[in-house]
Image: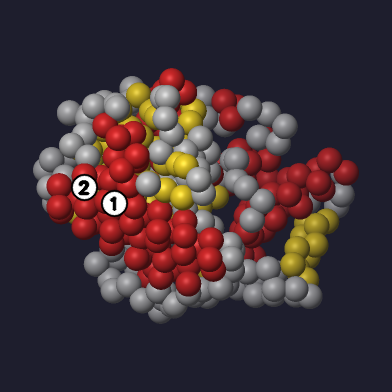
Amino acid sequence: MADTAVVFGANGFIGRWISRALVLDGWRCVDLDRRGRAGGAARDVEAPYYDGGNWSEVTLTRFLEQFGSVVVINAAGAAWSTDAPTVLRDNITWARRLGIACEMSESVAEIVHIGSAHEYGELPEGVAVRESDPLTPDSTYASSKSAGASYLVRAAYGRDVPIRIVRPFNVVGPGHGSQGLWASAVELYRNALAESSEQVVASVPRPETTRDFVDVRDVARLVTLTLGRPDLPLASVYNAGSGEATTIRELFDVFREETGIDYQFSSTTMSLRPGSRWQCADIAKAESELGWRREFSLLGSVRASLVLYGKQEDAVFPGKP
């Protein structure tokens, strides 16, 4: 059984927490970003797999084989707000070449791919989407995530190794980047706390839009629970969500509860990402098959994100999630 995990995209929001959760579970992690820059156990690797502005399936295969039996975790990819050429390159071309390398390499024991809830497309209001529901991607980003996943599924079947696809919904929590509603809300409240303001003004044109917010640390834990499970089918898909439908107004209510600072919405600009006005995950499959349970509430995510300002991640992730 593999004891080494090669985490592509380990410097990203989700990938960083996946790597941390794996280390806490005793895994040796080889951390790389999508450009081949190494960290952790990969610092001693002589030849990166990335060269000359492109990816090489051959060098990537050789790279993987340096570590013996490995789990490959693909948390790399372009975000929803990135320009179309970058989305296609990082979500499709990269996944295709990684899939080829996984199929060529004798060392790959398992594959995990981080997908996206956007692959489900427009969702009917009031319905929690299940993993067995059809995928109807309605944007370039969503389509690219589905296409990228297909290459890794093909590789898994070609090598007869397990593949687990985790589809996170709206991932929140400490260490988020600068894009999206969550990052904007955290920044607004951090500034308000620093300036002792009594109110924040957020650009939210549709405050009744409903999302399923899940803490990144819970997503990371779900990933670790998919590994080393020969009792599961060769290919398995799991939603990573809270199972709760929360409006944007309710999200800001939680920020107000934690800080005592009121909010006001402004609709002068469109700050919401495209997609369904309703999102909610059915998480029964992850709970029943993996024994996964959420550990972090939305209030806990807000609190940890505000605490992290200017501090180390150890302050919000002292042990296993």
Q: Compared with residue 312, is residue 163 higher up or lower down, i.e. above or below?
A: below
Horizontal and vertical percent for residue 287?
28, 49
Q: Badge 2, how many Cα within 10 Å: few under 14, some, many 20+? A: many
- SS at circle 2: helix
Instruction: Please tell me which residue is depicted at 34% across the width and 39% down the height of the picture.
Output: 59
Amino acid type indicated by mark 2: Glu
Name which quarter of the figure residue 209 lies in: bottom right
**Can residue 84 be spotted in the picture?**
yes
**Can residue 16 be spotted in the picture?**
no
Q: Quadrant of the C terminus?
A: top left
Q: In the picture provided, is 311 more to the left or to the right than 153? A: right
Which residue is more in the foreground, 316 or 98? 98
Q: Compared with residue 243, is residue 48 higher up or lower down, i.e. above or below?
A: above
Q: In the picture provided, is 170 more to the left or to the right than 151? A: right
Kindly identify which numbered label has been placed on residue 103. 2
Horizontal and vertical percent for residue 319?
46, 25
Instruction: Please tell me which residue is depicted at 57% across the width and 25% down the height of the picture.
Output: 314
Q: Quadrant of the N terminus?
A: top left
The residue indicated by pointer 1 is 99
Name which quarter of the figure residue 125 lies in: bottom left
Horizontal and vertical percent for residue 245?
48, 64
Q: Are marks 2 and 1 in contact (CB under 8 Å)?
A: yes
Amino acid type indicated by mark 1: Gly
Q: In the picture provided, is 79 more to the left or to the right than 49? A: right
Report how far apart the C-alphas of labels 2 and 1 lie in the structure: 6 Å
Q: Compared with residue 268, is residue 54 higher up or lower down, i.e. above or below?
A: above
- SS at circle 1: helix
The type of colouring in the image is secondary structure
